[in-house]
Image (cartoon, rainbow, N blue to C red):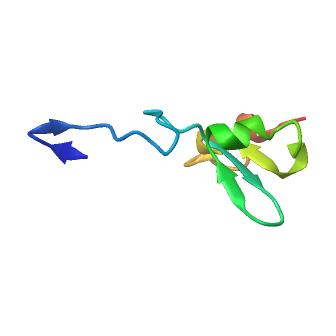
Amino acid sequence: VWQNDRVEIIDNDQGNRTTLSYVVFTEMEQVFGNAARNQVGMNPYYTIFNAKRFIGRRYDEREFNLT
């Protein structure tokens, strides 16, 4: 947020100044950030992370070959 002639970083709901790019989908909700990373062990097949690294890339680029 631009405030007082400078950028102010707003803390998230957990008091952190950054939010991790993790998202987990459950039957009841979508969880993101640190809370989602903490659930990776319980919901590994329903967790997405590092997706932002693929934004703007082509599907045939080497980074997409995950095997």
Q: Can residue 61 be seen in this snapshot?
A: no
Relative depth, front residue between 55 and 18: 18
Left/right placement of residue 65 relative to residue 16 reads: right
Relative depth, front residue between 42 and 63: 42
Q: Can residue 25 be seen in this snapshot?
A: yes
Left/right placement of residue 43 relative to residue 14 reads: right
Say which residue appears at 75% left-offset and 35% top-offset: 38
Say which residue appears at 58% left-offset and 37% top-offset: 20
Say which residue appears at 72% left-offset and 37% top-offset: 37
**Percent coordinates x, y for residue 54 in the rendering:** 63, 44
Query: What is the count of numbered marks?
Result: 0
Say which residue appears at 87% left-offset and 36% top-offset: 41
**Percent coordinates x, y for residue 46 in the rendering:** 84, 52
Q: Quadrant of residue 53?
A: top right
**Percent coordinates x, y for residue 13 in the rendering:** 49, 45
**Percent coordinates x, y for residue 61 in the rendering:** 70, 40
- 56 lies above or below 6: below
Q: Quadrant of residue 2?
A: top left
Relative depth, front residue between 65 and 37: 37
From the image, which quarter does the C terminus lie in? top right
Residue at the extreme bottom: 28
Residue at the extreme front: 14
- 2 lies above or below 62: below
Residue at the extreme left: 5
